[in-house]
Image (tube, grey):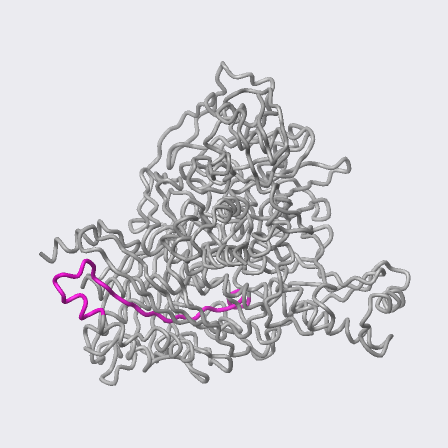
Amino acid sequence: MQVKINNKNRSFNGTPFKRLIDVLREDFGLTGTKEGCSEGECGACTVLLDGKPVNSCLISICQVEGAAIETVESLGLPEKLHPLQESFLREGGAQCGICTPGMLMTAAAYLKAGGDPSPDAIREELAGNLCRCTGYQHIINSVAKALSENKK
Amino acid sequence: MPTVGHDRLRKEGPQKLTGTALYVDDIPVKGIWHGVTVRSSVAHAKIKGIRFLKGFPWRQAVVVTAKDIPGENCVHLIEDDQPLLADGITRHALEPVALIAHPDRATAYNALNFVEINYEPLPSVLDFEKSKKILKTFSIKKGDAKKAMKKAWKKVDTTFRVPHQEQAYIENNGMMAWFEPDGTLVLQGSLQCPYYIVKAMKPIFKLPEEKIRVIQAVTGGGFGGKEEYPNIISGHAALLAKKAKRPIKMIYDRHEDMSATTKRHPAVIKHKAGIDKKGRLVALDIDIVMDAGAYVTLSPVVLSRGILHASGPYECPNVNIHASIVQTNTPPNGAYRGFGAPQTLFAAELQWEKLADASKIDAVKLRERNLVKIGSELSTGQILKESVGLKKCVDTVLKRSRFTALRRDHDKWNKKKTSPTWRGVGFASVHHGSGFTGNGEVFLKSKASVTLTKSGRFVIETASSEIGQGSMSTLCQIVSDALGVPYEWVELEANDTSRVPDSGPTVASRTCMIVGGLLYRAAKQLKAAIEEKAKKIPTTPAVLKEVAKKLAGKKSVFRITTEYEKPADIEFDDTTYKGDAYGSYGYAAIAVDLEVDRTTYEIKLNKIWTAQDIGKAINPLIVEGQIIGGTTQALGWAVFEKPIYKNGVMQNAEFTNYIIPTALDTPPMDVVIIEEPYSRGPFGAKGVGEMPMDIPAPAVCAAIKQATGLFFPEIPVTPEMIAAGIARKG
C-alpha cells in the first residue's frame, strides 16, 4: 500500500484495517500525533488528509491509499518553527501540549485556506479540537495572529 | 534586563509545538510489553475466585495477582487502607484485581475478555448522603453562631449540592516500569509528584528509597488527576515488570481513565447565614459532607481545605462549621484543582442571592459590606496582615463589566415578550489559600537547589513537575532575576528523583510561591558566593566559566540548597483548627454574562470579566493562561459536566457523553491581574493555579437566576433542569 506522508512516499505492508494513527506512530515513528479518546471526539490525533483535517483514530490505513497525509512533523522544527508554531509560542497557545499537534493541524488547514480571522470564526473552526488547559482564548489569539501575518 | 513581570517564552514550548516532546507513550523502549488491568465489576463483594479461561494464549502473557506482591499490598498515602490489588474482597466497582502483560497492546486488551471473577455480593452504599461510615471530621467554631443566628435580622437556610468532576486532561494516565540490573526500580511516566511514587513503592517492593528512581515524562495535563493516582499505576507496572523480567508500559484508554481513576469529591453543603439590618454577616452555620469513595486517598486534606474556605472571603464574628467525609462503595475520589474549596465556596457565594432576596438588598452590595481587608479575622481566628487585594478585584470587575447597568439592561430585555432569550449576569468573589494547608509545608520540609556547573551553566534542581502550568519558565524567571543573569542562562535539571531533591508535590498552588521562594533564596545565596569570588556577577559566559571553576573546586558543580523554614509568626493548631491556615491568600472576583434560549433552554455563555490578586505575575501571559483555563474548567462543571452513576459505575465515561467545553462553548474573557505583593513570596507572588476553579460556578447560577428567575443550588444546570423549573413555575 502506498501513501504519501509529509511529502515522502511510504509503503505499508501491515494489516489494512490498522488505524492511521497507529501506522503513523508505530510504523513510521511519527509520535507527534497524539491519541486522546480513540473515538473522534477530542481531535488530538488530527492530521491532514489531502489538505483536510481528519481524526486519524477513525481512519483505517486502507482508506487513505494513494492519499497525502500531513502531520505536525511537516510544519517546523524546534530550532526553526513554522510561523503558526511561532505564534502559538508567542501568544501562549500551548500549555501541556498534548492537544497542540492536532490543534496546529486544524489551524494549518485554516491558515492555508486564508480563513476568516475573527475570533468567532476561529472558535467555530477549532470546535472539534478539545483543550483542557488553555480555555482556548490564547489559541484563538495565536491563530488570529498567524492569519494576520500571513496576509502581510 | 529583568524578566519577572514579562512574557518570557515557554522553555519547553518549541518541543511541544513540533511533536518532538516525548510523552510517556511516545518513548521508544525495546522489548517493552503492554500491561492491562483486570477490574472488578461489582461495588462490594467477596472475591471467591479468579479464572483465566481457555481460548487465550496465556503462555505468551504474564499475569499478576495480589499474591505476587513482594511486600505490603497497599497504596501508601495518608492511610494505608487501599490495596494495590484487591485480595479476597472488592470495595468498589472497577477496583484492580489482577494485571496482565503481553508483547502486543491489542492482544493484552483482548486477554481481559478471558478472565472471570466469581463474587459473593456484600451490601453496598452507593449514595454518600446515606452513608454512615465517617472517615474524618473537622470543626471550626468562632463566637456563638447559634445565639447570633437567633438575633439576626434576616436568615436563610439552603442545601447546596455539587457533583463529581473528571479532570479530563487530554493525555490519559500512563506509566512505564523496569528494573535495572542492580535491582533499582525505574518508573517513567505522566505524573505530578515523583517523590509520592518513591514513597509509595517502598513498602510494596521492600526497597530503600535510593533503589527507586522516578522520572517524569512530558505530562499532558494533570489538574490533580496525576497527583496520587500514578502511585497505583506505578505499582501495577512495576509488579508486571518484576514478574515478566522486562520493561512494562501501561497506558489507560479514555474510558478506563474516566471511569476508574479519581475525581473531584461530590459534596452536600447545608448552609445557614444571618445578616443584621446593616447587611453585615453576623452568623454562619454550615454543615459539609463529602464523598470519599471506597478508600481514604487524599480525602482528609480535601475536606480540610474545604472547611477552611467555607466561610468565604468575608468577615463574620460567629461561625460554626462541621465537615465530614464519608465512605461509599464507589471508585475513590481524589485531588482536583481547587481541592475542596470550589465545593464549599459554591455554597458560600451563591447564598448571597438568597440573602439578597430576603433583605431586598442587592447581592453585590451585601458582599461589599463584608469583604475581608487587612486586619480582618477569618473563621479560624487568622488575622490578615498583608496582601489583600479583594476590594480591588471586586471594583475592577464591577467597573469593567458595567455590572449594575448590565443587570438593568438585562431586566429590560427579559421583560420584552418578543426577546428570544432571557439574559443574566452573575457575580462572585472568593479567596484561595496558597500552599499546603496548616502545618503541611512544615511537615514537607521541601528542598530545592540552584547550581552553577563547572562549564558555567545555572541549573535549577527541583521535583516540581511542568504539567502545562508553565512552572519551567516561571521558576527560571525567578532564578534569573534573583541572580541578575539573562533568562537564557538558566535551565532546569530533568525531573528525575536520582537528580533532584524533594521539593514537595506539584499541587496546592504552591510551586511558584513555595518552591519559587526556596529557589529565590538559593539564587540570592549563589549570587553572594559568586560576588565574593568575582566582585560582580559576570556578564559574559567566558568570565562566568572562570568563576564557576573557582567555586566548584574539585566538584563538578557548586550547589546551594535551601529548605523550607516555618515563618516564626505563622501558627496553626491542627487539633483546634485555630490560627493561620495559610501563609497567604489569593483573591478573585468574576462576572459571568449569559443568556438562556426561551425555546430550547440552552445556556449560552457570552462573556466573562475577572480580576485576580495573585501578588505578582512572574509571567503575565502564563498567569492569564492559568486564569482562563481554570475558569473554563469551572464553567464546564457549572453547565456541562455531569457524571452519571449506576451501580457505582460512571455510565458516561467518554468525551461523547461527558461534555467538556469546546472553543465554541467558551466565552471571551476579560482578565485583569491585580498585584498586592506578599512579602514572603518570590517578588511578591502568591498562588494562582486553583483559584480560577473556585469562582465561576456560583456566578453562573446567579446569572441563570436573573435570566430565568430560577434558583439552582446545584450544578450542572442543564436545559432539562431549566425546562422542569419553568414547568414548575407554570
Extreme residue in the front direction: A152
Write the residue at 33% across / 80% down.
B368
Q: Report the magenta residues as a range.
A: B410-439
Is residue B419 on the magenta stretch? Answer: yes
Residue A145 in the image: state x and y as whole percent.
Answer: 51, 59
Q: Which quadrant holds the C terminus of chain B?
A: bottom left
**Image side of residue B18 versus residue A137, left or right:** right
Q: Viewed as shown, does residue B265 lie left or right of A20?
A: left
x, y percent for residue B37: 51, 32
Q: Residue furthest top?
A: B55
Q: Vertical placement of B107 versus B503: above or below?
A: above
> Relative to the observer, which residue lies in front, B349 or A1?
A1
Judged left or right of residue B532, residue B73 is left
Q: Is residue B692 above or below residue B211?
A: below
Q: Is residue A60 above or below residue B603?
A: above
Residue B414 falls in image quadrant: bottom left
Residue B501 on the magenta segment: no
Residue B144: image x %, image y %? Answer: 31, 78
User: Which residue: 61% across, 54% down?
Assistant: B13
Front residue of B275/B442: it is B275
